[in-house]
Amino acid sequence: MTAVEDEVRHIETGPAPTRYARGWHCLGLIRDFTDGKPHQIKAFGQKLVVFAGEDGNVNVLDAYCRHMGGDLSQGEVKGNEIACPFHDWRWGGDGRCKSIPYARRVPLRARTAAWPTMVQDGMLFVWNDPEGNPPPADAAIPKIAGYEDPEWTDWVWYTTTIEGANCREIVDNVVDMAHFFYVHYSFPTYFKNIFEGHVATQIMNGVGREDVARPQAAGSDAPKNKGTSSTASYYGPSFMIDDLTYHYEDGNDVPSVLINCHYPIDENSFVLQYGVMVKKLPGLDDEAATGMARKMGDFIRLGFEQDVEIWRNKARIENPLLCEEDGPVYQLRRWYEQFYVDVGEVQAEMTDRFEFEIDTTKPNAAWRREVEENIARRNAAQQEQPV
Ligand code: FES
Ligand SMILES: [Fe+2]
């Protein structure tokens, strides 16, 4: 018999889910969809068309015309309808064929799939539900207080497509404290998770790392960011709001809101989007404040690019091997599971309140040592270089 410690641990990769999560999914900023043209979106394993009618309503339909399969996203918006490029059938935002210019009558069953939409805080959302139910009120996404507030900037927005990974990889980040140090150049000093209902929260405080370049307010002589406090919550399966405050060495605190959201293209790729808005420091004009949001966003992009590199190469893993300083991966995945089963199948263990705080004593001591070693190495290398 082999002793337990001699047994090789095997990775269970498990299949990616065959359905797409129930919930509101953000497709991007509304201003990118309201130009009077149809837009093609690949999401939930399908091709969709997004278009705004003359009435200003934004609609999402299955892109394939029920007549002969034409692609509505190649068509034209006419009035409040999307006209198919093949034979000009007109489809309304409710999914019904409203007219066929060359026909006496519209066939009785001329109805296609339409997704419920919502515009909030400058973003366009679609409701996905494999069971076909309308969005319940308790799935609502909270409003962002700073939006359209003159004291805050507008969104600085980023979009990127990730191939070769299921979107669960990004959701796993919620509990993954250690990767923030190793992948995102941050230094978590406090880390706690709370899951309840359809909300999964991560509370994280961090200090700036002396061994890596950090985002600054503006200009190279501006005060340095000495740390961050963050409370980030997923509302449903794909939309996270992060209340993120940057603390600067000159005593200034800059509150910001970071959106981190995604929608699945298929089970093995997804579109990741993130947006930043910051509260303007007194005396900072619009342009400078937006520049600051852009700087923060660019720094966040660096982190995501490194996430992507990890996801592209890693294995899907159903049975992660965890140490005490890891967050509650299994509980998080149980929470996430609620969006992949029928409403009637949602179990209490998926939605019951659950809290877990990681003891950061040991990781922090190790990371402090690593930062010091990096600085010492950098200083030594600089001294060797002739000036
Ligand atoms: S295929 Fe769309 S109108 Fe004929
Ligand atoms: Fe990450």
Image (spheres, rainbow, N blue to C red):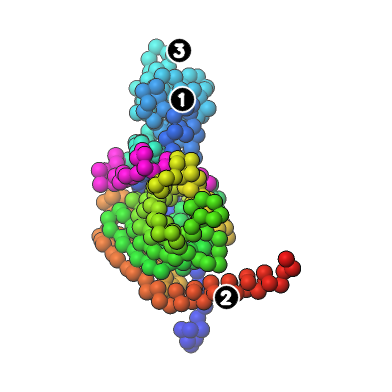
The residue located at (36%, 42%) in the rendering is 151
Reading the image, the residue beneath label 1 is 36
Question: In front here: 108 or 344?
Answer: 344
Local SS, label 2: helix
Confirm whether the magenta stretch covers residue 55. no
> What is the magenta range?
133-160
Image x and y of residue 334, in percent? 34, 61
Residue 120, how many percent across, how many down? 35, 38
Query: Residue under circle 3?
Result: 102
The reply to whether the residue tagged 1 has its Cβ within 8 angstroms of ligand 1 is no
Which amino acid does the dot numbered 3 rest on?
Tyr
Q: Is residue 134 magenta?
A: yes
Q: Looking at the picture, how far across and down is residue 261, in whole percent?
A: 43, 48
The kind of residue on which mark 1 rests is Gly
Among the two numbered marks 1 and 2 on one chain, the one whose residue lies closer to the N terminus:
1
Q: Amino acid at mark 2?
A: Glu
